[in-house]
């Protein structure tokens, strides 16, 4: 690309990034008091220092960005129809929230969850995310993104915003938005609903957007490396250690959920496996056969995906299909480990981006279908707003009181640190234009939140007795229908009278031998989805199909986070090792990429194999850590964003990140203290460890959930691992938060601080910011379309 610097120049810039300044003022370092300067930024214009030389782009090409004044005028253009539309959305949302939060009857209609969520998301995206864009991020499409000025055809490449939205959404939407809300339904429908919807608007989507933008401005650096650049050596090393270890555990847990969902499921293994060759075909098609034909390849991929799903049922009922695809959990775990390595080293355009884009069709399509079914069927929800367990520590599904454990049980969907790793991993290296970060970062997180709301509605739409029978441990129910009935009826739940017929009939309807103690959230979500979908389409005879479809949907949902997570883990390790051996920062060094990928895959793979072979099922060892570790990571990400914003001199708008950071810090540190110091064995790791050690010392052969001495030994070992890691995680997070506060206060005293952004490079490509271009974007698109193909800048990406 003619105007691009050499790779050596860019590496030099990266190394000098911590002290780089443009001219006599930092890039975008505006002060709140400078009103004229704010007006120049309002439409996305850069500060004077960031303004690129007018002759930097090719003179014979159209502009690489929409005129700032024209864009601002378009944003401010309000027609009567537009005003009426937003008033209607606000009124519908207001009525829905009143029905959910204030009106108290025996039941509440599930459509109000859909309306409250959608109306809130639309308003937040249109107004709040635009506020953040105007005053904090201030994108400038005249600047090239790392995907353009570092393009190498493997990790860095401009990717169509629609494809990238699919990749990003598929990568962030793992087990959390499906499992967490189902488990938290124990506490009633209202706490989870408020946290998912309000939490994403003020915390989760803000974090994703800011981390994505700041990483993009720094050449796609990882969260840990940004922390080191912004917070100094101590805070940076603590952040790098925390992010690396937490990432390994998160990927291992996600892989373990996939193994549990697909293990010994011929249908699921075949259909999910078929997404790999379909994605490879899409990648080749879009790069070589029909470049740029995103809609065309989308239709082909969608048809092939539906065929794979339908054929999966036929393969699952065949002899040869069961011989080939009926895999035990250990074999499946090794296959996922091998797949994780291959997916992380292949060029991103060949497998990762098209596969995630393909998965997004399945994910968003299924959730949209469920939302439509809820509106059509209008199921009545009998779960109370606040249940009997909202204020207790001994709930049968998840132990711990509403505060703080609701906020760590529901992580993804409201606020998730894992997203910050994706937003500073693959996505910033693929984004075409700076203004697209709002759609990808803020908009992508809103969609995941909607997934969480749909999962919550599915869980609370089934009978409460069945819900508790499915999600209570086998130790409580005895694993039998009779035991489950006795246990659930002894809980004293209002308007619940569970019978054996209800459990056996539901199991028969979904094609399972038993649904008793099917813990983990995923089976409950599948039953809830099947219960709603069969009322709309197919009747009771289709319930088994919808149930297995939902199980496969969940496995596909989570596997996409495993491959993206592995690639991001490799980037993180490369950045960390690059501080000692600079060659590792060279994204084009194949040997370094393979070494770091192998190390990270070996780390999470070892934990995965340990989990699969654990006598207690493995998930019991690691999943309790997932929520707290994930939210501690979110606190770290928000702390880094706070320091960056303060160093940019944006003082008056610092509250945008301080509010969610304060809440996340209080919640996660409090939850960590409970898990470390609580004397209640169901809550505290060390209390549970002591109770099982005492039981072994007393010569008992079974205790609590453990039915053998081997299982009791496993609990003792697991609680030591859990307790130790909890101490390490919360200590590292506190160090990072303190370092961020110190950096922020120093920046506030000095009116800003050093800028670690990459130097601006003139962009030579153009793309709209949203899914649908607005009027002024369409006009510029037409000018670019008129440029002869041979005169167009060469693109390495899609």
Image: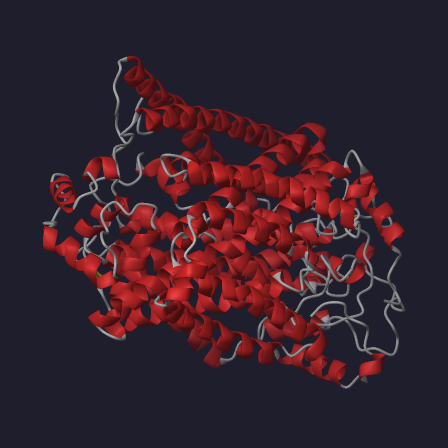
Is residue 643 positioned above or below 218 on the image?
A: above
Q: Position of residue 481 (x, y in %)?
A: 15, 47
Q: Residue 308 vs residue 700: left or right?
A: right
| Residue in front for this viewpoint, 607 or 652 | 607
Residue at 36% in and 62% down:
550
- Residue at the limit of the structure toward the top, as seen here: 697
| Residue in front for this viewpoint, 378 or 566 | 566
Residue at 53% in and 42% down:
634
Residue at 24% in and 69% down:
378
> Looking at the rendering, in which quadrant would you find the N terminus?
bottom right
Is residue 25 positioned above or below 628 on the image?
A: below
Q: Position of residue 667 (x, y in %)?
A: 43, 36
Is residue 674 positioned above or below 337 on the image?
A: above
Q: Quadrant of residue 132?
A: bottom right
Q: Position of residue 683 (x, y in %)?
A: 33, 29
Q: Residue 162 vs residue 582: left or right?
A: left
| Residue in front for this viewpoint, 439 or 342 | 342
Can residue 237 be seen in this snapshot? yes
Residue at 19% in and 40% down:
477
Q: How is the image coloured?
A: secondary structure
Q: Position of residue 722 (x, y in %)?
A: 45, 29
| Residue in front for this viewpoint, 479 or 103 | 479
Is residue 556 positioned above or below 796 on the image?
A: above
């Amino acid at each position: 690309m003619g105007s691009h610097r050499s790779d050596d120049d860019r590496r030099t810039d990266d190394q000098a990034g911590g002290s780089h300044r443009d001219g006599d003022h930092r890039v975008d370092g505006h002060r709140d008091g400078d009103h004229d300067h704010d007006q120049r930024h309002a439409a996305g214009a850069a500060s004077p220092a960031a303004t690129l030389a007018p002759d930097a782009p090719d003179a014979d090409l159209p502009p690489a960005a929409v005129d700032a004044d024209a864009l601002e005028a378009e944003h401010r253009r309000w027609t009567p129809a537009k005003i009426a539309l937003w008033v209607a959305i606000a009124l519908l949302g207001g009525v829905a929230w009143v029905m959910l939060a204030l009106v108290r009857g025996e039941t509440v209609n599930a459509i109000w969850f859909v309306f409250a969520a959608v109306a809130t998301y639309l308003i937040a995206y249109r107004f709040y995310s635009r506020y953040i864009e105007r005053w904090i991020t201030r994108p400038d499409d005249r600047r090239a993104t790392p995907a353009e000025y570092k393009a190498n055809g493997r990790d860095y490449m401009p990717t169509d915003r629609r494809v990238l939205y699919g990749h990003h959404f598929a990568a962030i939407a793992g087990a959390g938005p499906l499992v967490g809300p189902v488990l938290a339904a124990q506490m009633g429908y209202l706490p989870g609903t408020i946290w998912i919807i309000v939490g994403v608007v003020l915390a989760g989507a803000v974090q994703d957007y800011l981390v994505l933008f700041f990483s993009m401005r720094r050449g796609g650096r990882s969260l840990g490396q940004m922390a080191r650049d912004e917070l100094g050596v101590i805070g940076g090393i603590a952040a790098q250690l925390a992010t690396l270890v937490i990432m390994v555990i998160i990927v291992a847990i996600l892989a373990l959920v996939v193994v549990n969902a697909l293990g010994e499921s011929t249908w699921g293994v075949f259909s999910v496996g078929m997404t790999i060759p379909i994605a490879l075909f899409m990648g080749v098609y879009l790069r070589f056969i029909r470049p740029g034909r995103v809609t065309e390849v989308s239709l082909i991929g969608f048809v092939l995906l539906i065929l794979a799903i339908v054929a999966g049922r036929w393969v699952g009922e065949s002899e040869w299909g069961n011989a080939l695809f009926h895999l035990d959990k250990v074999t499946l775990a090794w296959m996922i480990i091998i797949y994780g390595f291959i997916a992380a080293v292949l060029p991103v355009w060949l497998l990762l981006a098209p596969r995630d884009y393909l998965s997004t069709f399945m994910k968003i399509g299924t959730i949209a279908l469920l939302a439509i079914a809820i509106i059509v069927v209008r199921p009545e929800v009998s779960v109370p707003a606040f249940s009997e367990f909202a204020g207790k520590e001994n709930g049968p599904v998840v132990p711990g009181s509403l505060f703080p454990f609701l906020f760590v049980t529901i992580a993804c969907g409201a606020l998730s640190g894992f997203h910050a790793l994706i937003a500073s991993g693959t996505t910033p290296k693929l984004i075409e234009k700076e203004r697209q970060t709002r759609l990808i970062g803020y908009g992508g997180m809103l969609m995941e939140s909607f997934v969480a709301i749909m999962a919550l509605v599915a869980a609370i739409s089934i009978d409460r007795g069945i819900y508790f029978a499915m999600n209570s441990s086998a130790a409580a129910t005895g694993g039998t229908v009779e035991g489950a009935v006795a246990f659930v009826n002894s809980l004293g739940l209002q308007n619940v009278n569970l019978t054996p017929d209800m459990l056996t009939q539901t199991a028969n309807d979904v094609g399972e031998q038993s649904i008793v103690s099917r813990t983990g959230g995923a089976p409950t979500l599948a039953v809830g989805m099947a219960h709603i979908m069969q009322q709309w389409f197919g009747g009771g005879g289709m319930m088994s199909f919808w149930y297995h479809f939902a199980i496969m949907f969940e496995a596909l949902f989570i596997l996409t986070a495993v491959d993206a997570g592995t690639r991001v883990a490799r980037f993180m390790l490369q950045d960390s090792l690059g501080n000692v051996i600079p060659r590792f920062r060279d994204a084009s060094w194949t040997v370094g990429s393979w070494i770091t990928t192998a190390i990270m895959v070996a780390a999470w793979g070892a934990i995965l194999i340990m989990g699969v072979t654990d006598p207690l099922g493995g998930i019991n060892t690691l999943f309790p850590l997932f929520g707290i570790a994930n939210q501690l990571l979110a606190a770290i990400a928000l702390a880094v964003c706070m320091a960056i914003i303060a160093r940019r001199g944006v003082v008056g708008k610092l509250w945008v990140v301080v509010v969610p950071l304060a809440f996340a810090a209080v919640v996660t540190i409090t939850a960590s203290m409970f898990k470390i110091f609580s004397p209640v064995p169901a809550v505290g790791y060390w209390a549970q460890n002591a109770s099982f050690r005492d039981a072994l010392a007393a010569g008992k052969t079974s205790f609590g959930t453990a039915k053998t001495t081997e299982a009791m030994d496993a609990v003792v070992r697991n609680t030591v691992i859990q307790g130790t890691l909890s101490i390490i995680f919360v200590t590292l997070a506190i160090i990072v938060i303190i370092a961020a506060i110190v950096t922020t206060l120093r920046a506030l005293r000095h009116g800003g601080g050093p800028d670690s952004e990459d130097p601006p490079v003139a962009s030579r490509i153009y793309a709209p910011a949203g899914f649908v271009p607005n009027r002024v974007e369409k006009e510029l698109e037409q000018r670019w379309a008129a440029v002869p193909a041979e005169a167009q800048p060469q693109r390495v990406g899609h």
